[in-house]
Amino acid sequence: MSQSVTSCLCGSVKITAEEVNPKFTVCHCQSCRTWGGAPFFAVQCGTKVQVEGEDKVKIYESSAWASRGFCSECGTHLFFKFKGSGEYNMPVGLFPSLPELTMDIQFFSDLRPSYYCFSNETKEMTTAEIMALYAPKI
Ligand SMILES: [Zn+2]
Ligand SMILES: [Zn+2]
């Protein structure tokens, strides 16, 4: 875990995350691929996150359990936030100099389309495995 400071492309929004896990996750679900045009590479940042320039952050309620935030000036994707726990997942690209970045797990591996694949050796979870693990808590 290490502290990281970053900002969106235009600089309107600054983010300080106290605890960023360098083992990042990949999500192949259709929502993530529609949002970003590609799988979502995310670092888990917990709840100790400060956002400056919040008036420029547009929040989209993407599901019953999470919302997605982006800069209303430049469109930079800022976070995926769980409503229940308040935990943030943020794009790994916001933290390019984080030490020891490692692709750890691929979520919704069964939804990964056939037109790309990664050679990284990672854990994987299918939709059924994710539902079995998380559905009771939602
Ligand atoms: Zn911006
Ligand atoms: Zn997803």
Image (tube, grey):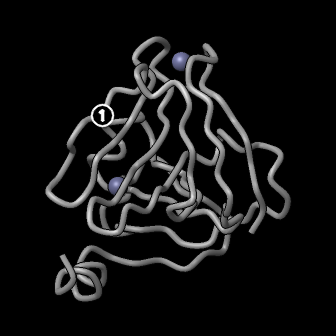
Q: Amino acid at mark 1?
A: Ile
Q: Position of residue 30 (x, y in %)?
A: 27, 49
- Hey, which quadrant is residue 99 in on the image? bottom right
Q: Is residue 128 above or below residue 7?
A: below
The quarter of the rendering in which ligand 2 is drawn is bottom left
- Give percent across and percent down for residue 111: 30, 61
Residue drawn at 27 percent across, 55 percent down: 66
Q: Which residue is mark 1?
A: 59
> Where residue 133 appears, x then y in whole percent?
29, 87
Front one among 117 and 23: 23
Residue depicted at 31% across the width and 55% down the height: 29
Q: Is residue 67 left or right of residue 64?
A: right
Q: Quadrant of residue 69?
A: top left
Residue drawn at the location 62% of the way across and 19% of the way down = 9
Residue 130: percent from the left, percent from the top? 30, 79
Quarter of the rendering containing residue 118: bottom right
Q: Quadrant of the N terminus?
A: bottom right
Would you say 78 lies left or right of 101 here?
left
Position of 132 with respect to 15 (left or right) is left
**Disc 1 on helix, strand or loop?**
strand
User: For the C terminus, which image quadrant?
Assistant: bottom left
Residue at the (34%, 36%) spot, across then down: 35
